[in-house]
């Protein structure tokens, strides 16, 4: 089966920031926040500092970093491709880009019918089944 359709992608600006952050913090991972303290934004953590479990799904990788979302949030967003971008501003208080004067931002678009036909049969991976 082809994996040509990505559930999550990153802009060139986001990939550049990820590379800079990786040099400072080592391996990284992302989790799409569902609200609360930091709103609904992609949060970037040093790998292992945010615990993912069976209630999270892995959408894919951006810049070599795994990207997760809660299963309940995924139920609403499953027809949507997430596009992670960077804008000026203060990042989430727990996200490592905060001191950079930039923050990650989630943009989105609906999958086309052809893309959805490819994705609807592709299983999503629970967060705790990844090492």
Image (tube, helix red, strand yellow):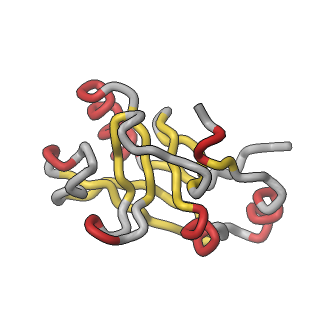
Which residue is at 62% across, 71% downward?
A: 110
Location of residue 79 in the rendering, given as x and y in whole percent from the top left corner = 66, 70
Please tell me which residue lies in front, 23 or 83: 23
Query: Which quarter of the rendering shows the C terminus?
Result: top right
Q: Relative to residue 93, is residue 50 drawn left or right?
A: right
Which residue is at 44% across, 65% downward?
A: 107
Which residue is at 20% across, 55% downward?
A: 93
Please tell me which residue lies in front, 115 or 36: 36
Q: How many marks?
A: 0
Is 75 located above or below residue 16 in the figure?
A: below
Query: Quick one: which residue is furthest to the bottom in this view?
Result: 76
Please tell me which residue lies in front, 80 or 13: 80
Q: Relative to residue 93, is residue 61 drawn left or right?
A: right
Residue 103, quarter of picture: bottom left
Location of residue 106 in the rendering, given as x and y in whole percent from the top left corner = 41, 62
Query: Which quarter of the rendering shows the N terminus?
Result: top right
């Amino acid at each position: 089966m082809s994996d040509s359709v990505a559930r999550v992608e990153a802009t060139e600006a986001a990939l550049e920031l990820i590379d800079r952050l990786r040099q400072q913090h080592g391996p990284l991972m992302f989790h799409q926040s569902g609200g609360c303290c930091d709103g609904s934004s992609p949060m970037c953590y040093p790998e292992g500092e945010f615990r993912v479990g069976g209630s999270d799904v892995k959408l894919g990788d951006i810049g070599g970093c795994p990207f997760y979302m809660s299963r309940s949030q995924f139920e609403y967003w499953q027809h949507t491709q997430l596009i992670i971008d960077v804008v000026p501003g203060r990042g989430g208080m727990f996200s490592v880009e905060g001191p950079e004067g930039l923050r990650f931002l989630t943009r989105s678009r609906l999958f086309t019918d052809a893309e959805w036909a490819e994705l609807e049969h592709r299983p999503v991976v629970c967060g705790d089944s990844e090492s």
